[in-house]
Image: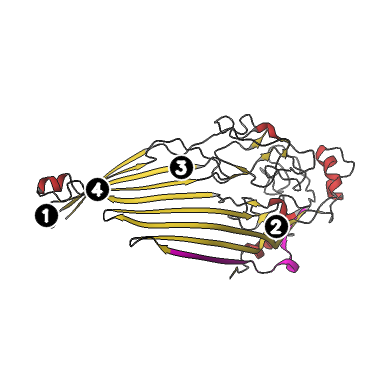
Amino acid sequence: MMYERIQGNDMYDAATDVPFSDSVTFHNVLLANPKTASATGVTYSVPILPSSITGLDSSNYALPVSFQFSGGIQQALGAKSVLSVSYVGTQNRHQNYYNNVNLVPYGDLPSLQAGTSSTPYNQLVTYPGFTDIKQAENEANGHYNSLQVDLHANVRNDLTLQFGYTLSRSIDPTTGGGNDFDLDNGTNPYQGWLYDLGPSIFDRTNVGFLNFVYDIPLLRNSPSRGLKTGLGGWQLSAIITAESGAPLNLGVSSQNVSSIVPDSSNRPNVSGSISYPHTVDEWFNPSAFSAPAAGKWGTLGHDALRGPGRDNWDMSLFKNFKFSERFNFSFRADFFNLWNHTQFMGNVQQGGISTSLGAGNFGAITQAYDPRVIQLGLKLTF
């Protein structure tokens, strides 16, 4: 059980509240009268603008806590291999987010957004004279559960391998912005953190890997010193990884009403069944989504779609040439993405797929990871 200390931006944000946050900036003015434009002589008026406040909800600010737990078994498979099977999980409580409490009645949002409201926005909010009143609250929850399998084996004296597999699920309300995912703004203040609850940005349902180190026995024990030194003693190693797709978060074009209706954070409606053609032009079916009505939030769940999975082979070939007791020459060749397999990119952090509804390439693959890279190295030690 680990508690997080409350410090930093939780309190510092209040330092910029009114009256410190109220400022008006004019450019190219006279020093004698900062309200007068130097080029035209026009005197500007200084309006009184609605201000915003950022604070914390002291009545809902329990210490964030993370419960971490695990259990597993190990079984020897013969004399040189060990199989481990474990359950690993966490439960996170009282996680932090910002929520705007200065709201207009929900039913007034459509007319405000459409520009047909007869009443100005700031006269409809709970606290007139202010725009945002954001409060940091420690209320959100998250969890992670996983089955982890690991096999270490010395197959032969010259071959060592390890296999690992994780089946997992991670859920939290992180929206993917804020201060490195801390103190994020809730995207729907009428619903709170639950609207942003979904798969974590690092959630991968399946992750597997296999690595091995193989001391190639060919000519390793040759009686010929020349053959043994020149052709024997090579070592081959590889890391093979595979993982299922990362979460994708779709957005729509700006529907901003003050700061209540988010811009790209707002998600589209699901208006049909979601399919995955898995092509470059259509990773997912774009016709399954539509823009929400004015003043409404989309029905698509947070991070509800999945991007491309990934499988990758990295391999190294190594040879140590020993000329004498003092002189040693080493050669290695590293192959990254050995088979030059196209690996499409697509996740919340890195992008890789067009996820903005209304874009001409909505749903299309836009990036890929590096193709095959070969790196050669020589080293002399003496």
Could you tell me the amino acid type at mark 1?
A: Ser
Could you tell me the amino acid type at mark 4?
A: Ile
Residue 311 badge: 3
Q: Residue at x 73, y 56 (%)?
A: 99
Name which of mark 3 and mark 1 comes first in the sequence: 3
Could you tell me the amino acid type at mark 2?
A: Tyr
Q: Quadrant of residue 340?
A: top left
Q: Secondary structure at mark 2?
A: strand
The CA distance from mark 1 to mark 4 is: 22 Å
Q: Main secondary structure of the magenta part?
A: strand
Could you tell me the amino acid type at mark 3?
A: Asp
Name which of mark 1 and mark 4 comes first in the sequence: 4
According to the image, label 4 marks what residue? 216
Is 224 or 331 nearer to us in this picture? 224
Mark 3, mark 1: which one is toward the viewer?
Answer: 3
Name which of mark 2 and mark 3 comes first in the sequence: 2
Position in image of residue 335 (x %, y %)? 34, 42
Mark 2, mark 3: which one is toward the viewer?
Answer: 3
According to the image, label 2 marks what residue? 98
Q: Secondary structure at mark 1?
A: loop
Quadrant into which the C terminus falls: bottom left
Q: Secondary structure at mark 4?
A: loop
Q: Is the C-beta separation of discs 2 and 1 under 8 Å? A: no
Mark 4, mark 2: which one is toward the viewer?
Answer: 4
User: For the magenta stretch, what is the residue range?
Assistant: 51-74
According to the image, label 1 marks what residue? 324
Quadrant into which the N terminus falls: bottom right
Q: Is residue 42 above or below residue 101?
A: above
Residue 335 relative to residue 207: left or right: left
Mark 2 is surrounded, within 10 Å at the Cα level, by few (under 14), some (14 to 19) or many (20 or more) other residues, namely many
Position in image of residue 73 (x %, y %)? 47, 65
The CA distance from mark 2 to mark 3 is: 38 Å
